């Protein structure tokens, strides 16, 4: 397989530091060598490539922006974004695993946990000695997490949890779940460990999207959670939303990887596919599609590097993350569909990654806030009027 050189029409490369490029290139090589040769088989069989987890840990891809004292790489947020981009060029399921481990498990433990929780969990999660998941979404409460029905009750020595969560990435393979539940009407975070009596995590089957990813339910039937497993600095939904903001940031970068993969395949196919005596790339309608794809990729790249720099400066607003997630997911799905059109009937074969990316992006556009929810987040910000009710 030829070495992938990327897609960069406006020399966005010049905006990255040497360290950022080095991180990106190492993950790019990992995806070329380890992910792409096996991902179609896993997608077909609806299995997650577990053997990649220790390799990703060895590369420092879990919690990479967190302090080195926990065994993390202490990278900046642009480097983190580039990691997400390259992983999703392989598959959304691979990026989702790393995104959940980093943004939705390690981040809340780091931000809201006790020193003891951080010292115990973060090094283990960084090395993938432990795998985590994030339990917020419920069967009846997706876009409205404040309505959650999962409840915690204070008892001697800890808490009793009852309820369920849905659509949980990594759930069935996780050693620990960061679970959000109402305690006396206030949303708090709890670390629910595998093996706690009454806690089960059945895998959800029959997906047409994110097939190379573990998606689960979490069920809590009178689960006792010891006192030391509550995240002490959580109080209210805002803490859970701060975690989602971290994940949305990674998604905005990740989907650019899917865009690039689809564009690259479509461009090369169009140049070699001959119809009516010349390559289809020589026809105006195909060129219009390719130029549109390249333009939207470039816009997304520029959005991402700008929000990455803002994040590193501590200036990034959650509404700006919504802007990036909303735009980039929508354009990624458009690009995947356009690439399928260029490939014609060949576009539905898993000889090419296009239909797999398109199916995955249907989920990625929806999770961590639907397109509509991000529209309303930005709408409220610019008008001062909430349209959620």
Image (tube, rainbow, N blue to C red):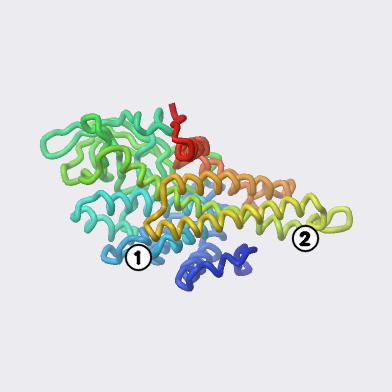
**What percent of the width, then of the height, locates residue 292?**
69, 51
Give the answer, above or below, for where 1 lies relative to 251.
below
Residue sticking out furthest to the top: 389
| In this view, the mark in front (1 or 2) | 1
| Label 1 environment density (alpha carbons within 10 Å; few <14, some 14–19, many ≥20) | some
Q: Note whether residue 257 is visible.
A: no
Tell me which residue sits at (49%, 66%) in the image.
Answer: 24
| Label 2 environment density (alpha carbons within 10 Å; few <14, some 14–19, many ≥20) | few
The image quadrant that residue 238 belongs to is top left
**What percent of the width, then of the height, locates residue 173?**
37, 47
Tell me which residue sits at (45%, 48%) in the image.
Answer: 248
Disc 2 secondary structure class: helix
Tell me which residue sits at (31%, 58%) in the image.
Answer: 129
**What percent of the width, then of the height, locates residue 154?**
16, 33
Residue 74: assigned label: 1
Q: Image check: 265 left or right of 181?
A: right
Labelled pair 1, 2 in contact (Cβ < 8 Å): no
* 292 or 133: nearer the viewer: 292
Residue sticking out furthest to the left: 156
Q: CA distance from mark 1 to mark 2?
A: 44 Å
Residue 328: assigned label: none
Q: Image check: 359 left or right of 348?
A: left
* 179 or 317: nearer the viewer: 317
Q: Image check: 247 left or right of 108?
A: right
Tell me the residue that label 2 is attached to: 272
* 102 or 177: nearer the viewer: 102
Tell me which residue sits at (23%, 35%) in the image.
Answer: 223
**What percent of the width, then of the height, locates residue 89?**
55, 57
Which quarter of the image is occupied by the N terminus? bottom right
Who comes first in sequence, dot 1 or dot 2? 1
Which quarter of the image is occupied by the C terminus? top left
Residue sticking out furthest to the right: 277
């Amino acid at each position: 397989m030829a070495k992938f050189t990327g897609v960069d029409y406006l020399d966005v490369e010049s905006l990255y530091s040497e360290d950022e490029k080095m991180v990106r290139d190492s993950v790019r090589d990992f995806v070329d060598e380890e992910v792409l040769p096996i991902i179609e088989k896993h997608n077909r069989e609806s299995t997650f490539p577990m053997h990649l987890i220790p390799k990703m840990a060895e590369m420092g891809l879990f919690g990479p922006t967190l302090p080195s004292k926990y065994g993390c790489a202490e990278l900046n947020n642009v480097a983190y974004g580039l990691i997400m981009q390259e992983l999703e060029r392989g598959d959304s399921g691979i990026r989702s695993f790393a995104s959940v481990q980093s943004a939705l498990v390690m981040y809340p433990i780091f931000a809201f946990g006790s020193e003891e929780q951080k010292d115990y969990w973060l090094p283990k999660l960084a090395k993938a000695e432990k795998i985590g998941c994030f339990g917020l979404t419920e069967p009846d409460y997706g876009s409205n997490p404040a309505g959650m029905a999962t409840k915690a009750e204070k008892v001697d020595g800890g808490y009793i949890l009852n309820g369920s969560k849905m659509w949980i990435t990594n759930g069935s393979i996780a050693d620990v779940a960061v679970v959000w539940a109402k305690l006396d009407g206030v949303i708090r975070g709890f670390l629910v460990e595998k093996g706690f009596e009454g806690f089960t995590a059945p895998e959800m089957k029959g997906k047409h999207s994110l097939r190379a990813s573990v998606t689960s339910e979490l069920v809590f039937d009178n689960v006792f959670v010891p006192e030391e497993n509550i995240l002490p600095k959580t109080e209210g939904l805002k803490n859970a939303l701060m975690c989602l903001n971290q994940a949305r940031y990674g998604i905005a970068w990740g989907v650019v990887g899917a865009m690039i993969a689809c564009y690259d395949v479509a461009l090369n196919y169009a140049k070699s596919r001959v119809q009516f005596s010349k390559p289809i790339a020589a026809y105006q309608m195909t060129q219009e599609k390719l130029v549109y794809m390249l333009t939207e990729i470039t816009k997304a790249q520029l959005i991402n590097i700008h929000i990455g720099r803002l994040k590193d400066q501590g200036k990034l607003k959650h509404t700006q993350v919504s802007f990036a997630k909303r735009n980039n997911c929508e354009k990624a799905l458009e690009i995947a569909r356009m690439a399928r059109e260029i490939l014609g009937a060949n576009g539905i074969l898993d000889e090419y990654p296009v239909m797999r990316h398109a199916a995955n992006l249907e989920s990625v556009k929806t999770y961590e806030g639907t397109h509509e929810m991000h529209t309303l987040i930005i709408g409220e910000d610019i008008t001062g009027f909430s349209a959620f009710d």
